[in-house]
Amino acid sequence: MAGTLVIVGAGQAAFALAAKLRALNDDRPVTIIGSEDVAPYQRPPLSKKYLMGDMSFDRLQFRGPEWFAENNVEMRLSTWVEEIDRANKTVRMQDGSTLSYDKLALATGAAPRELPAGVGGDLDGVLTVRDKRDADRLMAEMQPGRRLLVIGGGYIGLEAAAVARQLGLEVTLIEMAERILQRVAASETATIMRDIHRSRGVTIREKTGLVRLIGTDGRVSAAELSDGSVLDVDFVIVGIGVLPNDRLARDSGLDIGNGILVDEFTRTSDPDIHAIGDCALLPMNGASVRLESVQNAVDQAEAAALILTGQEQPYRPKPWFWSDQYDVKLQIAGFNMGYDETLSRPGQREGSHSVWYFHQGHFIAVDAINDAKAYVSGKKLLDTGKEPNRAILADHSADLKLLLA
């Protein structure tokens, strides 16, 4: 039997690693350490179906407690690791106790960027969206007629704005950059998503930053914006990105960048320590990237399981993402980093659209807005390494299935 595996973190990647090991008939003792008081669960629905009341929390959990007991996966909840002792291969918990490992997996995820206290980030009613505790706090605030300010026009901010509007709140979203989705999507996609939100009653103010939040009796009551205006608010959602939880790795001397640096076999600079999921900085197309997605958390974790069982197969990410806003499904295949050309085309159904990304003439990603055919076609092209026929893409009447012929 292989030695003990300790997994630090109890999210999607942690569960996927443990589950894959058991599917591979690996019976080594596994301990998962999580700071929350609940077993691993799906996070994407927290800010959507769970917040809307369409899905109960028990439906978000991957498995019930009997699965962990039957599969010899020990859960240590409501606790966290303070220190890794690489020389003695132990982790020290916050209560001073220690746990030995033969292999260690860091699945510590990422944490939302927060506003500094100097601009009002410490006021009550200033919230982020990441875990169940965040969602439960938000649920109490999301009451019809209340005034919400969303700071940040990325996917987190836009999804929060969509849920709030559907629940009957007044929503203003500010983005300090030139446009929403500037870091993650082309202007064509941003234009479509902006129009969708404005048609639902969201006020979007681009090129507008936050100067400070104003409090009354310790709770946020207004926001002073960079254009000189002051906006009365009842609460604020901060959606300005995330930071990898890499403190343990840094303190223990592992190589880090914008995350915990791993090789194509998910190993850190210490061969007995792996890193997976949102905290991992992995090699892809000649660069080091962090892929903040369910797909990467699962696929990289399953790759790590194979490697831990002696199957030295390099992990080659094939990214895909999605974002649900109102009745709009945005599906993304590929990774558009470094794109220098886009091709935009309407879909064959009303309200559908796709944006195709290229780098030096090569197809690298597609955004599909209510256009499943474009998503499936683009994903298959990326999976096979085939280039799309530009003439077919440019012909808006052409069936995208022709791209795969």
Image (cartoon, rainbow, N blue to C red):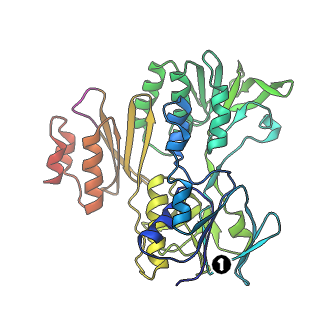
Residue located at (62% from left, 43% from top): 132
SS assignment for the magenta stretch, majority: loop
Amino acid at pointer 1: Tyr
- Quadrant location, the C terminus: bottom left
Q: Where does residue 22 sit, x and y in percent of width and height?
A: 46, 70
Task: Tell me if I can see residue 147 in this picture.
Answer: yes
Decide whether residue 346 is among the magenta residues.
yes
Q: Where does residue 368 sit, x and y in percent of width and height?
A: 33, 40
Q: Quadrant of residue 361?
A: bottom left
The span picked out in magenta is 345-350
Q: Where does residue 247 sit, x and y in percent of width and height?
A: 72, 63
Query: Looking at the image, which is closer to me, 365 or 162?
Result: 162
Decide whether residue 38 is among the magenta residues.
no
Reply above or below: 34 against 105.
above
Q: Residue furthest top?
A: 145
Q: Where does residue 309 sit, x and y in percent of width and height?
A: 46, 80
Q: Residue furthest right?
A: 217
Residue located at (50% from left, 66% from top): 17
Residue located at (53% from left, 30% from top): 53
Q: Quadrant of residue 214?
A: top right
Query: Looking at the image, which is closer to me, 249 or 396?
Result: 249
Task: Tell me if I can see residue 48 in this picture.
Answer: no
Q: Is residue 85 left or right of residue 41?
A: right
Category of crowding for the residue at label 1, using alpha-carbon neighbours closer than 10 angstroms: few (below 14), some (14–19), many (at least 20): many
- Give the secondary structure at mark 1: loop
Query: Looking at the image, which is closer to me, 171 or 28?
Result: 28
Reply above or below: 325 against 387.
above
Identify the residue position indicated by label 1 in the image: 101
